[in-house]
Amino acid sequence: MPNPFVIAECGVNWRDLIDADQMIKAAANAGADAVKFQAFDTTGFPIGSALYNMVLSKSDIRFLYWRCQQHNIEFMCTPMYPEAIEMLNPYVKRWKIRYNDRENWQIINLCQATGKEILISTDHIHKHDPSIKLLYCIPEYPPSQPDPTKLKGFDGFSSHFPCISIPAEVAIGLQYLEVHVRLDKYEPPHYYPIDTNVSITMSELAELRRGFRL
């Protein structure tokens, strides 16, 4: 079994920095290589909404980066607006562009100007700079079952599929695997993270990681 670079996508599956800190620790213990958050602004979110409360400030970014350093796991964060790139640049080794911004050249060009590697979620192969890595992403939410044959030519797979067996099957030969994760403690009937339906638990992440090492 190959051993891809595993990115634990925390996304919006946390409520506060305490949750985020627990996700970093759990992802590191599960064997992930990186843990990823999202940097978005308040545009379109009413004050007091769950997403409004998860907008990351520069001090939040510093805290999450420092906690990643403490747990020996790479910090990643997707820039969802151009100004976020300057804020994130001191703290990230590489960039991850979401599917909705796969052709947002303002964000992509700003990331390229930093000279760092860029991972882009997309559903088609196209000519690109060698520094850009393409991660196959199914443009559905929640997604249908992934077809391993469609990953040919991609550098990785960005999975929104809440099942560990599917990524393990399709990740053969891929350099990167991104999976949405959530804390085990948030099981029904307790608080449901926003992306519950497209996420695996940290325990499942650990099982997935062990599968690659067998």
Image: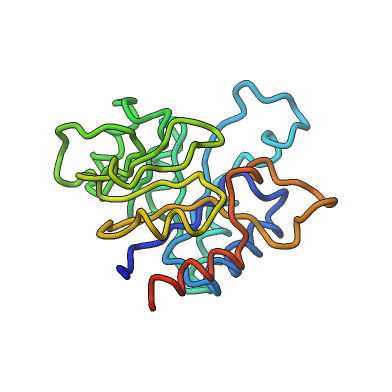
- Which residue is at a point 51% across and 66% down the rendered structure image? 68
- Against 5, residue 58 (above or below) is above
Residue 185 is drawn in which quadrant? bottom right
**Front-most of 207 and 100?**
207
Residue at image position (38%, 45%) is 96
Identify the image's colour scheme: rainbow, by chain, secondary structure or one colour: rainbow
- The front one of 172 and 40 is 172
Residue at 58% across, 64% down:
204
Identity of the residue drawn at 54% across and 54% down: 163
Instruction: Report the front residue among 135 and 54.
Output: 135
- How many labels, in total? 0
Residue 11: give x, y in percent of width and height.
56, 46
Extreme residue toward the top, this view: 44
Q: x%, y% of residue 167?
A: 43, 55
Q: Nearer the viewer, residue 84 or 139?
A: 139
Q: Is residue 32 above or below residue 81?
A: below
Q: Among all residues in the image, which is located at the extreme bottom?
A: 214
Could you say where residue 153 lies in the image, as x and y percent from the top left? 20, 44
Side of 98 relative to 71 (left or right): left
Quadrant in the picture for the N terminus: bottom left
In the rendered image, the quadrant that contains the C terminus is: bottom left
> Residue 150: image x %, image y %?
29, 40
